[in-house]
């Protein structure tokens, strides 16, 4: 429609060859240059050559905290907020912040979502399901506690908690401590308010419930069986003992703890979900709770045999998918990301190709388009998913599907069928999350070689490119103290499995890019949201004026 039409850029003509946009997932710039920097340890001739074009065609960008709509600058970046910003060109208050605000104002318990579940929560059991940590990527511990306290205030007497252990957004081997802390807090609330709040089930987030983009429904099935049916391979009477035992002296990562259920003296689960109960998923981030939401909400569901589908009232803390309106009921309205760039791109008739493997495909489609699944214009867009390896920890195969992504992207570039080709390389991030330094170095090396192949293709066809990353991860593989010294426990460095606060690289180039185009030097604090106007310019378009300013200047406009 005319609303989404953008005028031609005054000094950057449209190139008749495609623009390639590469997102390196989880690859930042660290100020520490030691053996724990997997990006510098890796063999990266291509990324190094790009860096050598600084400051005209290489720079860094903010990718964490308030620059991407997170509550504070102590919040590390993540793929959701990063790709939201890259696709939307604006800084929007993200889910974490919306939930904080709604909890502080009490709105959580005033809006339609709570009204939908309230009577069931009061007369039956309220089940809260989500990730147990203070990572701030998918969920936060303080929000969970405020939710429990608020529910008690609103007359809820019986609450059951279904918890995924983390070790990915927070340090590994902290799961026992998190469950202990929660157990203590819950027992305090029970005494204080004469209520019945209990931890009922759990498991590691990569093994149980939190699959994403339909990479492996078996993960969701295990979570549904544990939380809803009360069935798991392991039963315990005490959740702290459960996690401690299943961690097997820390030989099992928090992320991969097998599913467990708490049972009473009678051997029956203390918190299976029954008809008449209410369920709330307390993760604010969408990707890894979309599938369990479908399993809880859809009458017609065929991804696995649910065996029993209780008659419940269900709400997400947020709505996770604006297009699917999933879940139908939610406690806090999600951030509204309007006028994302893809609407303008297809509004101008440009043809889009987006590619990654299963683990990240939604990053360059769903997150990119403001948490809307599906095509905006199926005639103009093609989303290609390369199936990810299933059921392994990605340090076992650190190349992941990078070569396949490169091949599919190369084919799209050469096909002449697309104007805008974007891809995401997951492995610096996914392997970085395992904490395995050697494997992460390999992941970065492979990624560099794939980037090389794609930039050669751009060279060959005379196109343009923009390369950036969504947040840091692989560049910092050890936990450091305040002065930057690696932290050790028992003489061993503590692996950093989570993302970082670091800035990320951004590079532009290609034979199709006019010589006079370069980065301006008056935006030192620019962040990921500034990339959007930049790639619109590289597509030959002027960006909407409410977008964050473009990073590039031309000699003509003298900036
Ligand atoms: C995950 O979901 O894997 C992590 O919590 C965050 O990683 P991502 O933001 O890079 O997807
Ligand atoms: Co990540």
Image: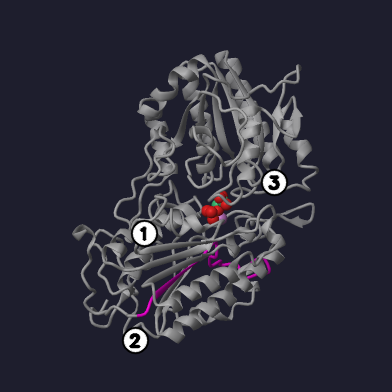
Q: Position of residue 256 (x, y in %)?
A: 69, 46
Q: Is residue 420 above or below residue 293?
A: below
Which residue matches tag 2? 515
Q: Which residues are magenta?
A: 17-37
Q: Is residue 36 magenta?
A: yes
- Would residue 39 appear left or right of 488 to someone viewing this image? left
Q: CA distance from mark 2 to mark 3?
A: 50 Å
Q: Is residue 313 visible?
A: yes
Residue visible at 66% across and 69% down in the picture: 441
Screen quadrant of the N terminus = bottom left
When asked about the image quadrant of residue 247, the answer is: top right
Secondary structure state at the residue bearing disc 1: loop
What is the CA distance from the residue labelled 1 to the residue labelled 3? 38 Å
Question: Quick check: can you spot residue 181?
Answer: no
Q: What residue is shown with label 3?
A: 256
| Display colour scheme | one colour
Assign the magenta stretch its main secondary structure.
loop
Element marked by disc 2: loop
Distance from mark 3 CB to nearest ligand 1 atom below 8 Å = no
Q: Nearer the viewer, residue 108 or 274?
A: 274
Count the marks: how many? Answer: 3
Quick one: label 2 or label 1, which is nearer the N terminus? 1
- Residue 23 in picture, x, y percent from top left: 48, 66
Q: Earlier in the sequence, mark 2 or mark 3?
A: 3
In the image, what residue occupies the spot 54% across and 79% down?
A: 452
Q: Given this view, does label 2 or label 1 mark the residue nearer the observer? A: 1
Q: CA distance from mark 2 to mark 1?
A: 35 Å
- Give the labeled residue for mark 1: 378
Quadrant where the image shows the C terminus: bottom left
Residue 171 x %, y %: 65, 49
Q: Nearer the viewer, mark 2 or mark 3?
A: 3
């Amino acid at each position: 429609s005319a609303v989404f039409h953008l005028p031609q850029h005054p000094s950057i003509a449209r190139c008749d060859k495609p623009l390639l946009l590469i997102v390196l997932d989880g690859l930042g710039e660290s100020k520490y240059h030691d053996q724990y920097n997997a990006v510098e340890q890796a063999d990266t001739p291509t990324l190094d050559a790009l860096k050598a074009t600084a400051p005209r065609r290489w720079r860094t960008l903010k990718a964490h905290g308030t620059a991407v709509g997170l509550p504070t600058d102590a919040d590390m970046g993540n793929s959701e907020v990063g790709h939201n910003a890259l696709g939307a060109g604006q800084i929007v208050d993200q889910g974490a912040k919306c939930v904080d605000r709604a909890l502080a104002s009490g709105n959580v318990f005033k809006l339609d979502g709570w009204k939908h579940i309230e009577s069931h929560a009061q007369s039956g059991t309220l089940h809260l399901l989500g990730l147990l940590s203070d990572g701030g990527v998918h969920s936060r511990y303080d929000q969970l506690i405020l939710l429990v306290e608020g529910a008690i205030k609103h007359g809820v007497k019986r609450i059951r908690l279904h918890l995924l252990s983390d070790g990915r957004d927070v340090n590994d081997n902290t799961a026992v401590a998190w469950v202990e802390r929660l157990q203590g807090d819950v027992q305090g609330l029970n005494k204080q308010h004469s209520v019945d709040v209990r931890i009922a089930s759990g498991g590691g987030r990569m093994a149980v419930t939190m699959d994403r983009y339909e990479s492996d429904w078996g993960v969701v099935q295990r979570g549904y069986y544990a939380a809803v049916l009360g069935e798991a391979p392991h039963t315990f009477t005490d959740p702290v003992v459960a996690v401690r035992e299943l961690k097997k002296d820390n030989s099992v990562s928090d992320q991969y703890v097998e599913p467990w259920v708490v049972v009473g003296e009678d051997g029956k689960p203390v918190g299976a979900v029954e008809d008449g109960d209410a369920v709330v998923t307390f993760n604010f981030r969408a990707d890894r709770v979309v599938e369990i939401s479908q399993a809880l909400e859809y009458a017609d569901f065929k991804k696995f045999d649910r065996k029993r589908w209780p008659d419940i009232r269900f709400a997400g803390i947020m709505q996770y998918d604006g297009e699917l309106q999933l879940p139908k009921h939610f406690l806090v309205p999600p951030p509204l990301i309007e006028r994302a760039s893809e609407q303008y791109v297809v509004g101008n008739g440009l043809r889009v190709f987006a590619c990654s493997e299963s683990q990240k495909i939604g990053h360059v489609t769903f997150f990119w388009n403001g948490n809307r699944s599906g095509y905006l214009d199926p005639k103009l867009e093609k989303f290609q998913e390369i199936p990810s390896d299933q059921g392994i920890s990605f340090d076992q195969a650190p190349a992941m599907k990078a070569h396949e992504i490169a091949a599919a992207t190369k084919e799209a570039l050469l096909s002449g069928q697309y104007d805008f080709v974007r891809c995401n390389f997951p492995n610096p991030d996914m392997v970085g999350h395992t904490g395995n330094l050697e494997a992460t170095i390999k992941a970065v090396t492979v990624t560099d070689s794939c980037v090389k192949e794609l930039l050669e293709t751009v060279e060959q066809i005379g196109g343009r490119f923009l390369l950036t990353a969504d947040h840091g991860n692989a560049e910092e593989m050890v936990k450091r103290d305040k002065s930057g010294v690696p932290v050790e426990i028992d003489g061993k460095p503590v692996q950093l499995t989570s993302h970082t606060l670091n800035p990320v690289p951004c590079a532009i180039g290609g034979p199709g890019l006019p010589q006079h185009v370069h980065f301006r030097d008056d935006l030192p604090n620019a962040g990921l949201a500034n990339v959007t106007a930049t790639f619109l310019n590289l597509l030959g378009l002027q960006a909407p004026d409410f977008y964050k300013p473009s990073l590039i200047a031309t000699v003509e406009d003298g900036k």
